[in-house]
Image (spheres, grey):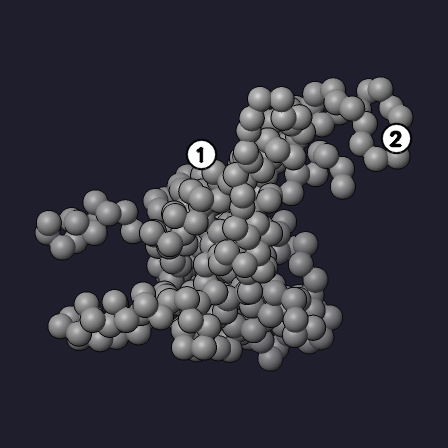
């Protein structure tokens, strides 16, 4: 592996051990990485299970157009989120996706596959990506004898937006292939029954046989996170359409000039971005990680 291609250790970390230091112990780079992994994983696990994965603040998606109305961008506001591994994803400023170039970059078959009665269905995801910054000299690794080898000087916790076509959701009911809370069953109870139901849900939260949401968040077994319904399934029936660690932010129903049946094979539907208003962007079906002071305000305490 190239040292500049940073891989996040939290993706495969199970129950990390703390390095034990003592006088005279020889330390290598792996000892310092293990030290970072231990503290990062403990904080991430606490954040994930205390707050859940989802949007903490901001990250609202909306469409903006230029003055002439000929170019349209999907604008995502600055904000903060927690992913399924408990990693903080911080977007420091607004970010934009140019919709016309994105639409043109999709193949005709892919657009037709995601073209339903309400338009072309596309989901916006946000995921954590570590990014190397700067370079510093180091000893060469592997079968190399170079004296000018370089490694990253720092690694930044960065992010990536992905706009993904959803052929599986074009004809599905509105609630299919959207995020579901780990505590949906509790929400369905009467207010009087919810406290007992919540306690039981927490007691069963680790049980794979009775709790369908047992793997919604990272577990200490080192296994890869399974895709959730909002991540979709590719045509091979195995691969997910979106990275399983990615957070669903919004669903877009892109209006088209033609009805799906009027678009012949090999021809792309014609998007009508001028009609893509707020009613066609679902910002509220995402998961939210509710701050304690927000819950206090809701309950008047």
Quadrant of the drawing holding the N terminus = top right
Q: Seen in the image, is 229 located left or right of residue 34?
A: left
Residue drawn 71% across the image and 34% down it = 4
Q: Is residue 277 visible?
A: no
Tag in front: 2 or 1: 2
Q: Seen in the image, is 25 located left or right of residue 297?
A: right
Give the number of marks. Answer: 2
Q: Are marks 2 and 1 in contact (CB under 8 Å)?
A: no
Give whichever of 227, 211 is nearer the camera. Answer: 211
Q: Which residue is mark 2?
A: 144
Instruction: Estimate the x, y position of residue 24 in percent, counting from the top left.
Output: 62, 22
Specify the farthest residue to the bottom.
Answer: 261
Q: In the displayed structure, would residue 180 be above or below residue 23?
A: below
Residue drawn 65% across the image and 35% down it = 30
Q: Seen in the image, is 198 located left or right of residue 268?
A: left
Q: Seen in the image, is 226 located left or right of residue 202?
A: right
Residue drawn 49% across the image and 58% down it = 219
Marked residue nearer the N-terminal end (2 or 1): 1
Q: Which residue is mark 1?
A: 92
Q: In the displayed structure, would residue 85 be above or below residue 135?
A: below
The local secondary structure at tag 1 comes to loop
Instruction: Estimate the x, y position of residue 54 in percent, counting from the top left.
Output: 40, 53
Instruction: Estimate the x, y position of residue 300 in percent, counting from the top left.
Output: 10, 51
Residue drawn 63% across the image and 72% down it = 113
Distance from label 2 to label 1 (Cα)? 39 Å
Q: Quadrant of residue 138?
A: top right
Instruction: Estimate the x, y position of residue 176 in percent, counting from the top left.
Output: 45, 74
* Mark 2: few/some/many CA within 10 Å (<14, 14-19, 20+): few
Q: Quadrant of residue 267?
A: bottom right
């Amino acid at each position: 592996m190239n040292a500049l291609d940073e891989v996040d250790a939290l993706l495969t970390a199970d129950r990390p051990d703390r390095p034990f230091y003592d006088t005279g112990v020889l330390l290598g780079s792996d000892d310092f990485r293990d030290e970072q992994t231990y503290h990062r994983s403990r904080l991430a696990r606490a954040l994930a299970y205390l707050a859940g994965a989802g949007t903490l603040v901001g990250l609202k998606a909306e469409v903006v157009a230029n003055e002439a109305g000929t170019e349209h961008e999907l604008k995502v506001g600055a904000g903060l989120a927690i992913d399924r591994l408990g990693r903080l994803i911080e977007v420091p400023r607004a970010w934009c996706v140019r919709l016309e170039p994105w639409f043109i970059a999709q193949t005709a078959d892919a657009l037709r596959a995601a073209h339903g009665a309400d338009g072309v269905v596309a989901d916006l995801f946000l995921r954590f990506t570590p990014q190397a910054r700067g370079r510093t000299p180091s000893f060469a690794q592997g079968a190399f004898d170079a004296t000018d080898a370089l490694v990253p000087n720092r690694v930044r916790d960065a992010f990536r937006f992905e706009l993904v076509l959803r052929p599986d959701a074009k004809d599905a009911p509105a609630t299919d292939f959207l995020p579901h809370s780990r505590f949906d069953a509790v929400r369905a109870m009467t207010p009087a029954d919810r406290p007992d139901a919540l306690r039981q849900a927490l007691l069963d939260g680790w049980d794979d046989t009775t709790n369908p949401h047992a793997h919604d968040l990272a577990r200490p077994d080192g296994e890869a996170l399974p895709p959730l319904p909002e991540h979709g399934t590719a045509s091979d029936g195995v691969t997910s359409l979106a990275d399983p660690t990615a957070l669903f932010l919004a669903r877009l129903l892109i209006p088209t000039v033609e009805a799906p049946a009027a678009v012949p094979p090999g021809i792309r539907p014609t998007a009508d971005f001028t009609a893509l208003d707020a009613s066609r962007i679902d910002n509220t079906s995402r998961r939210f990680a509710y701050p304690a002071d927000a819950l206090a305000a809701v309950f008047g305490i």
